[in-house]
Amino acid sequence: MSTDPSQKAAGPVLEVRDLEVHYGPRRRRRRALHGVSLSVAPGETVGIIGETGSGKSTLARAALGLVRASAGSIVIGGEDVSAYGHRSWRALRRRGVIQYVFQDPLRSLDPDLTIEASLAEPLLIQGVSRQEAATRVRAFLSRVRLSDDLLDRLPGELSGGQRQRVAVARALVTEPRLVILDEPVSALDSANRVQILQILKELRADGVALVFISHDLGSVAGVADRIAVLYRGELVEAGTARDVISEPRHPYTRLLVRSAPTLHSAPADRAEREALRALLHA
Ligand SMILES: Nc1ncnc2c1ncn2[C@@H]1O[C@H](COP(=O)(O)OP(=O)(O)OP(=O)(O)O)[C@@H](O)[C@H]1O
């Protein structure tokens, strides 16, 4: 049986079961995630929304092997990676099966590598020839609407929006099965935000699965097939994007929907928002 998760096509590309994550030393141990279960099908875009501190980044980091689960399981491409050590996770990430985009593109890009080297690196690691890598890099650059002129620049010489587009191109250039995007548009101005969201929609057509994490329901709503809502470390609601937005069940989801002006033609009713807030903090 193959032990390479990239070789297993059938079934969910990501399956998280009863995930628990704690931070801190034993006496001051704090629970960041509790009983989180989530499944992402090939080619599906799942939005994870929640307020600050709800555990969104922790879930992303756990799925990338950057924090250790205290309980539960993580299965990527049919392979249980929960017991993977540091090296196996690193190898999995380097093989490009799972990729990531963080809020700050400087975290995803090496500041000392030119844009061309940064984009080619994951391909060269996979054994792609230099010539083929150069062709693919240029093709992806145009898909994220950047010009070849940027190829010999360093990340520090680009605008924030250009950097984030490079980070998106780098995550997708190896044609991974799963990309985790943690607040990919939160640091951008509205014009860049709209462009990146449009680019993500277009890239979905390639069949890659996306986990799109955001505190902003408005950003996720137009891209996600399904939406899961994290509240205080627990998944309190999950469903199709349409159902979660049109018929939110949990009070916190209702508050999010009411507070997202882009989802409504009229401003949400302030009294109702206040009532929901009071209910959540009771
Ligand atoms: N390295 C860490 N050490 C200790 N506690 C942490 C660490 N990282 C996160 N936490 C705590 O875990 C909880 C969840 O944090 P997390 O960063 O996952 O939330 P988030 O929903 O991504 O928030 P934000 O939107 O502000 O990034 C918070 O209470 C946070 O203080």
Image (cartoon, helix red, strand yellow):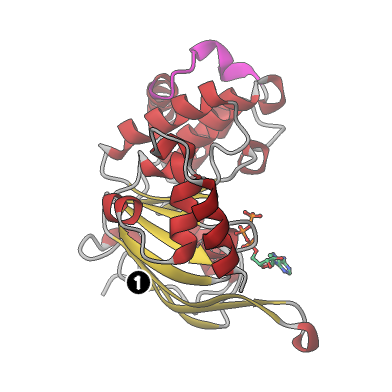
Residue located beneath label 1 in the image:
79
**50 vs 20: above or below:** above
Q: Quadrant of residue 223?
A: top left
**Is residue 152 shown in magenta?**
yes
Residue 259 lies, in percent from the top left, at: 51, 46
| Residue 173 in view in this figure | no
| Residue at 63% in and 35% down | 187
Quadrant (top left/top right/bottom left/bottom right) for the N terminus: bottom left
Q: Nearer the viewer, residue 277 or 90?
A: 277
Q: Nearer the viewer, residue 39 or 260?
A: 260
Looking at the rendered structure, the secondary structure element under dot 1 is strand
**1 vs 264: above or below:** below
| Residue at 65% in and 21% down | 159
Q: Is residue 247 left or right of residue 259?
A: left
Label 1 Cα crowd, 10 Å radius (few <14 / some 14-19 / many 20+)? some
Total residue callouts: 1
Q: Is residue 90 left or right of residue 246?
A: right
The magenta region covers: 143-153
Residue 28 lies, in percent from the top left, at: 78, 83
**Is residue 150 shown in magenta?**
yes
| Residue 82 in view in this figure | yes
Give the residue at the far left of this rendering.
10
Q: Residue flagged by tag 1: what amino acid is it?
A: Glu
Residue 108 lies, in percent from the top left, at: 61, 42
| Residue at 68% in and 24% down | 154
